[in-house]
Amino acid sequence: MRFTTYTRYKGGFLDALNLEALLEHLSDFLLDGGFAGGPHFHPYWGWSGDDDASSVDSLKEALLRALLETGQLTPEMLSELRGEGDGDAELRARIAELLDDLVERMVEEGYLTLESGSGPGYPGTKLDPEGKGGHVDEARDAAERVDFSVTRKGMDFLGYRALRGLLGAMGQSSTGVHDTPQLSTGIEAGAASRPYEFGDTLNLDIPATLMKALEREGLEVPLNLEYGDLMVNQTEYRSSCATVLMLDISHSMILYGEDRFSPAKRVALALSHLIRTQFPGDTLRVVTFGDRAQEIPLSQLGKAQVGPFHTNTAEGLEVARRILLSQGKEMRQIIMVTDGKPSAVTLPDGRVYTNSGGLDPRILQATYREVAACRKAGILINTFMLARDPYLMQFVQKVSEIARGKAYFTSTMTLGQYIMMDFMKGKRRRVG
């Protein structure tokens, strides 16, 4: 006869940690705009560092900082890390094991994936069972080559937390829909009921229907309903909207050490989560524009970085326009986030013509041509500026005039609130 022995479960330190709170605390690290050139020194944007931000080692360092900043380490661990302890090797090993376990747990719960090599505690590590030989060194070398990436679940979680933060800052307890003047029959009542007409959704207003029948026949049983008694609820017509978020990845987005790109990425994730959960008929696509423009999948947004690029606004608008025209939506719009004037344009032969000084007539002409094409296609362009460069202001005001869109002068602190207010509530503000 087989016996099963049960022992009392003793929770470890890892079980007391709030993994989601840690992941939210790491959002700046995971969405870092960085610099596409890697370790690089330049007199304008400075030193970008030696560390690979996509390595597991960098992730562990960020986790350790998050644990310190959120006060989730024990006093003994803090003393040891500050060099005030007794040099307890066992305690340091426990801290290293905790970081390994945290990464492993994030992988197990689907927030992260490991892409190359393997490290201690992960499948594939070849450790010497006796702790001798060169296997430990080989494993250590392999661990240094391990990269991580944020999964779709991880990106969605970051988008949810970003959306919650933005709505909280705006004082919104719930999200809305795109309002239009037209009324139609739908599911939720939002206006006075009216007599049923052929073709309406049979969303009956039961009290109003019974009242009309009672007024006609009086208080009799059974109560006979006629076609003219039917009353249906009216709701505000909810249109579907296709949105392209254009993100500037030129070098100025991290100029002088200010990261303007990470907040833009956070807004993109928040918009994505909002659309997926509240506007299932809507779509959101992301286009980055530097020397060239390209669409990037939302799942890869976390890896997108700023580079040593100019600003090819014309090609960005062209790519966005092609995407929107391929979608059969009633509303089409471009949300453009930029901090610089157009300084590049793609020539017919594929070469890129650049001019960083002033507003080059050749570049402007091509850009305004694309703006006019968007207006002709019924595409609204709303521009959010992260700088107050007079040349940029002049350019954006002209874009707004041609496209009949709106121009917003904002900052990294208010960018998300401005975009969400524009998208959700239709509050327009022209500054100029």
Image (cartoon, rainbow, N blue to C red):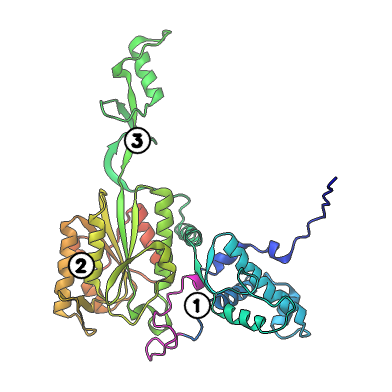
Q: CA distance from mark 2 to mark 3?
A: 37 Å
Task: Determine the residue positioned at 25% across, 57% down.
Answer: 324
Q: Which residue is mark 1?
A: 53
Q: Earlier in the sequence, mark 2 or mark 3?
A: 3
For the stretch drawn in magenta, the main secondary structure is loop
95 relative position to 324: left or right: right
Give the answer, above or below, for where 106 lies relative to 134: above
Q: Earlier in the sequence, mark 1 or mark 2?
A: 1
- Numbered mark located on residue 196 in the image: none
Q: Which residue is mark 3?
A: 186
Q: Amino acid at mark 2?
A: Val
Residue 31 lies within the magenta run: yes
- The kind of secondary structure element at disc 2 is helix
Residue 55 image point, x, y percent: 53, 76
Task: Determine the residue positioned at 40% across, 84% down.
Answer: 256
Residue 177 image point, x, y percent: 37, 47
- Numbered mark located on residue 399 in the image: 2
- The kind of secondary structure element at disc 3 is loop
Q: Nearer the viewer, mark 1 or mark 2?
A: 1
Give the class, few, some or many, for how many residues have Cα within 10 Å of label 1's Cα (few <14, many ≥20): some
Residue 1 image point, x, y percent: 85, 45
Span highlighted in magenta in the image: 28-48
Q: Quadrant of residue 288?
A: bottom left
Give the answer, above or below, for where 365 lies relative to 209: below
Q: Which one is in front, 273 or 399?
A: 273
Q: Amino acid at mark 1?
A: Ala
Task: Determine the residue positioned at 34% across, 27% down.
Answer: 202
Q: Which one is in front, 343 or 143?
A: 143
Q: CA distance from mark 1 to mark 2?
A: 37 Å
Q: CA distance from mark 1 to mark 3?
A: 49 Å
